[in-house]
Amino acid sequence: MLRRSLLASTVLLWAAAGLASAAPSPAGEPQPAPPIAPIPAPRDIAYPGIITINVDATDLTRHIFRVDETIPVANAGPMTLLYPQWIPGNHNASGPIDKFAGLVIHADGKTLRWTRDPVHVFAFHIDVPTGVKTLDVSFKFLSPVTQDEGRIVMTPAMLNLEWWDVALYPAGYFSRDIETEASVNLPAGWHYATALTTASNEDGVVHFSPVTFNTLVDSPLDAGRYFLRENLTPSGHKTPVHLDVFADNPDLLRITPAELRDHRNLVTQAYRLFGSHHYSHYDFLLSLSNQMGGQGLEHHQSSEDGTVPGYFVNWNGTIATRDLLCHEYTHSWNGKFRRPFDLWTPNFNVPMRDSLLWMYEGQTQYWGFVLAARAGLWTRQEALDAFAVTAATYAHHVGLAWRSVEDTTNDPVIAHRAPIPWRNYQLSEDYYSMGQLTWLDADTLIRKLTHGRKSLDNFARLFFGMDNGSYVTQTYTLADIVRTLNKVVPYDWAGFLKRHIYEPGNIAPLGGISRGGYKLVYTSVESPFEKSQEHMYKFTDFNFSLGFSVGHNNILTGVLWGSPAFKAGLTIGTKLVALNGTAYSNTDLKRALDFDLTHPEPLTFIVEQNKAVRTVTISYHKGQRFPHLVPEGSGPRSLDAILAAR
């Protein structure tokens, strides 16, 4: 314990520095700490001057992005710089502040001291001396070098530059009111693609034309050694659309005429669906790599689309990823041009609210499936198989009994997309696929109510088709959604959405499948779509039989709540060591499941869980089960009509 005289002198020093704690109450109980320096709220006024940002992206070995930034200042005194925190499309505070390092700020040749805000740790406070007009800021973005640290964004063959990783901006302004000029140093001989407009490109340094800070953040850049660019602009249209492909090696860039035709059809079918576009040009930034992390992220005039290396050269094996570009492209209309009112924010450090993600993501997920079929990226059967997997998955989501779909819109903030142990009971971002099934239900219902004269296509054209060519964001509310549905056909749409989205205790909404002329069944035959999923994501699927999936080294990657595996005490992370007395293999388990149909013997596993080995017996005799949609009834099937090209 400090001696009394030393304690007294320490308090005097703290007081002189303005750091003394609040005086104790008469009762001697603790009181709140004094307030910290305020962070200016964003105002819709022009920022004085243009911020310049230069990024050196040439350190491919250490994955380090080096940043030099020049920030004009209006006045001397307190100033706060912000590192982007709430990233559009991630729906949470995912700005990688843990990888931000080496911050140094100079002004007129002198180093200025900065202080991180102890509560809002994405904010940095400085005191600008009198007479200073410009801050020279430098720092580094230490991007992941292993997958354990996060998504790899730099490899020897390619890189993905997201500007929110490499920029500070001033507090107190709407991001649309801050002008920026950005440039990037790329490795020698590399190609690049971005929605930004190139002003100059000399000696490996690319300078871009000035844009507002919100546009910069919305315009990522891909670059790499091996590059293919294809024109997807539909005939008769002047607004350019391009497919920009980067790959681990040049052999992966071979695209057939049929594959190119189907990608061009995607743009055509989207125009016919929405009756509009909301960009001056559009770029699909597609990376094909098993080294750089996969990605699917929407932007207004581009999308980041990262998938398996064999996307083109192993076309028949990549069925499960062929809706990726369709989904992210749809977001140019739903999410970027039209955005939920509580998801739009004036800058990237005001918290977003996700309450309408069942529309933003759910209807986008629906149109992603539909456009994949209409464009020819999927056959009709592949699209039906994809819907079958979704329907079966949610038919087993017992968590719907206690939790509403709307409540899962909070999951990006709750879990930050981290793994969870009981996916079908806890639920996690189910607004995507439950939203998709809800919109399928709505589409088939509209068709039924109007005797096939109208559909959800009419809603899409009304809701997203206004102001063709404009890319000024327009927000929407639940009331706007209901009002537009009623313009298509009068119905109790508020009650419909309340039942499907806002109330717990529901089962999966499979009405769209039955009304669409199909029913969900299970057989022992696995569809090519499911085989593609297993191959791409490295697992073997026993979810609809025993209730688990098996990953690398025979370790369970998922266990369904209430399934035979759950009742036997198996969990994620359990290793299957042996089956019926022999070393475990997925092939042997498949054979055993088929054998049990005629010889109903229990399955006996030896499992290792938390270093403990035990024997588990599961009595299950229904064989392998894989979901399919099969025709039901007679006459035209509205689901077929939904999937048909326009």
Image (spheres, rainbow, N blue to C red):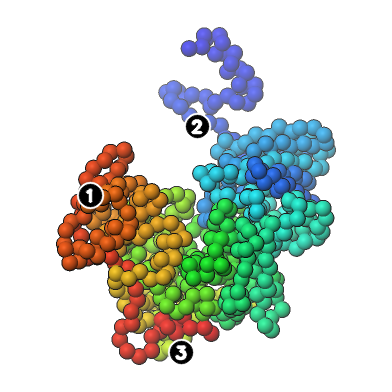
Q: Which residue is mark 3?
A: 453
Q: Which residue is mark 1?
A: 581
> In this orientation, does residue 300 appear?
no
Q: Quadrant of residue 82?
A: top right
**Local SS, label 1:** loop
* Label placed on residue 385: none
Crowd tier of the residue under label 2, counting other residues whose Cα lies within 10 Å: few below 14, some 14–19, many 20 or above? few
155 sits left or right of 614 in the view: right
Marks 2 and 1 in Cβ contact (< 8 Å) = no
The amino acid type found where label 3 is placed reads Arg
The amino acid type found where label 2 is placed reads Pro
**Local SS, label 3:** loop
Label located before the other in sequence (2 or 3) = 2
Query: Mark 2 or mark 3, which is nearer to you?
Result: 3
The amino acid type found where label 1 is placed reads Gly
Query: Which residue is located at x 62 percent, y 36 percent?
Result: 116
Between the residue at mark 2 and the residue at mark 3, the CA separation in whole angstroms equals 64 Å
Query: Which residue is located at x 64 percent, y 69 percent?
Result: 243
Label located before the other in sequence (3 or 1) = 3
Residue 88, position as x, y percentages in the image: 57, 57
Q: Which residue is mark 2?
A: 32
65 sits left or right of 119 in the view: right
Marks 3 and 1 in Cβ contact (< 8 Å) = no
Between the residue at mark 3 and the residue at mark 1, the CA separation in whole angstroms equals 61 Å
Residue 640, position as x, y percentages in the image: 42, 83
Label located before the other in sequence (2 or 1) = 2
**Local SS, label 2:** loop
> In this orientation, does residue 642 appear?
yes
Say if 486 sits above or below 186 in the image. below
Query: Which residue is located at x 67 percent, y 83 percent?
Result: 235
Say if 361 sits above or below 110 in the image. below
